[in-house]
Image (cartoon, rainbow, N blue to C red):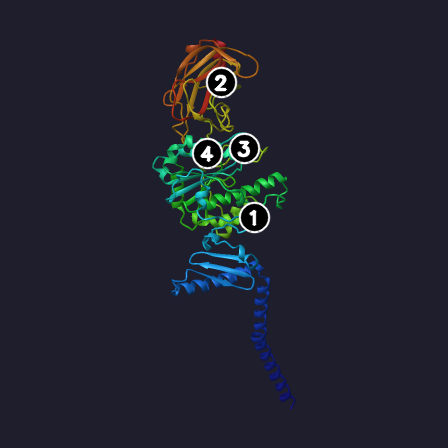
Amino acid sequence: MKLGFLKRIGYGILILSFLTIVFHVTVLNRRRSSDVLTFRAKDLSQKEYRWLNNRKETQQWESFRDKGNPEKESVVVQTDNYTLHFSSNTKELSSGNDAKDYVPRQVSYQDFLNQPSVDLTKLRANWRADARIIQNASNKQRFLTIGIPTVKREKDEYILNTVQSIVNCTTENELTEIYIVVFLADFDAKWKEDISKRLRKNFQNIISKGTLHVIQAWESFYPPLDNLKHTFVDPETKKRWRAKQNVDYAFLFLYSQVLSTYYIQLEDDIYTIPGYLTVIKDYINKMKDRWVCLEFSELGFIGKLYHSTDIEKLAKMVLLFYAQQPCDVTYLNFNVQMLQFKRRIRRPTIFEHVGYHSSLPGKVQPLKDRFFLAHPKTLKGDNPPAKIYTSLPFEGYFNPDKAYNKEDGVFWSKRNGKANDWVSVVFDKPQLLDRIIIQTGTESHPGDKIHYAKLEASLASVSKGPGMPVCKDNKLLGYFEDGDLKIDDVRSVTKQQKIHCLNIIITNKQETWVIVKEIAVFAVPQENKQKS
């Protein structure tokens, strides 16, 4: 009797458990599903809710139109608070209160899709043509677009030299494979006019090929840049500068996305190497796995290569965080979101940062890429203390001291050599020299050598205050051959007289810039001095 009673209790517990499970699976799950839907519907903003309604009504109208009502070219749908104006390719939304002021505009839904953010800008039809300063740029799709944003700087202007470096390192055939898009991202009209004129004057060849795009943006594209909240503790001027730079980049991305298969961005103070385009193509072809971003410089956002189909997404992400972080950080997060979890940097890199003064007023930024060709010294000269002077203009990083001191680097002019241009080594104390070796040009820029020049030794000098002294009593030591010069017996010319100055003098104009890779001087050994 007791055993039967226990069995009945056990069966009852099992039945009750089964009914509880069924209740949870059916009734409660339905309630939870309803709760979630109710919560999400309430959580939609009023703007999103209206957009969904408008989209639904648009689809209804398109369905109605496609079924065949050619006689109806437009229709007006009146709701409680809004009037929707539809035509075969346009749609406008106006408040019921403002319906009397409504003026139809030819704006398609695609125009809204093209907007990086409805809150930031209203890009009109043909906005890319409106952005161009030089109008004859080609739109035919090419292999690569090189985007270069630039703004007015307090001191050095680098942009023309950067474009010149790209042109110098690109063959005539390759110029039809690339676009160079220079974005004048400053609101100073006079500055933009000046830079535009100089670009037209200096680069007529690539303008005629449709290779050079020079663009500007309208101020309405930019969000408010005051009272910004950042994740970095910086002065207000730097916050504003960084935020604007992000929007500059986004505008450049959006403009460039339709021009080519790939997009790469540089800064306006960059030099590159001959064959850079072949390097990029080869590195792309080596990629066996899917990739999002390939890097050809380790610095900042320099030399980052993307598929053009991805840069609209990147633009939107940069705009989303325009006030919070620089693009240098955002692109790394973007790559992860696009499922590339590690950086892919091509070494050695092919873009060298040469600027010294940042576009942020008052900021000095002598950044150097560790993986760019360093140009180490190989001749191991004695090179006693001296000062180096030149008539050739140069960027700060490629100063003439680089050719003489024992650290890595070269002297690189920023214009073609002309007759009577010179580079002089003025010794702190006159020297008795035995040998001199001078090398010009580099493996990456073999054409930028000294083509026609001579070397003279000055056996006297007169100081006239600060600056270079006057070198006198000059003796010809020799002429350059194929960019190099080697003097094995200096004393056959100078006898036992000490040298105050060494003067490299260009004797004829040349069509290339000038690189002096290394100047190595060797003093007379001490035992030879004692014998003499």
Q: Residue 362: name its quadrant.
A: top right
Q: CA distance from mark 4 to mark 2?
A: 38 Å
Seen as rendered, the residue at the extreme front is: 100
Question: Which one is in front in this view, the residue at disc 4 or the one at disc 3?
Answer: 4
Q: Do the residues bearing badges 3 and 2 touch, measured as CB atoms within 8 Å?
A: no
Give coordinates of residue 21: x percent, y percent: 58, 76
Q: CA distance from mark 1 to mark 4?
A: 31 Å
The local crowd at label 3, few if under 14, some if 14 to 19, many if 20 or more residues have their Cα within 10 Å, is some
Question: Looking at the picture, which amino acid does disc 1 mark?
Answer: Phe
Question: Which one is in front in this view, the residue at disc 1 or the one at disc 4?
Answer: 4
Q: Do the residues bearing badges 4 and 3 touch, measured as CB atoms within 8 Å?
A: no
Give coordinates of residue 478: x percent, y percent: 39, 15
Q: CA distance from mark 4 to mark 3?
A: 15 Å
Question: Which one is in front in this view, the residue at disc 4 or the one at disc 2?
Answer: 4
Q: Earlier in the sequence, mark 4 or mark 2?
A: 4
Question: Looking at the picture, which amino acid does disc 2 mark?
Answer: Val
The local crowd at label 4, few if under 14, some if 14 to 19, many if 20 or more residues have their Cα within 10 Å, is some
Q: Earlier in the sequence, mark 4 or mark 3?
A: 3
Residue ID at (43%, 62%): 62
Label drawn at residue 425: 2
Give coordinates of residue 359: x percent, y percent: 55, 35
- What residue does disc 4 label? 196
Q: Earlier in the sequence, mark 3 or mark 2?
A: 3
Question: Looking at the picture, which amino acid does disc 3 mark?
Answer: Arg
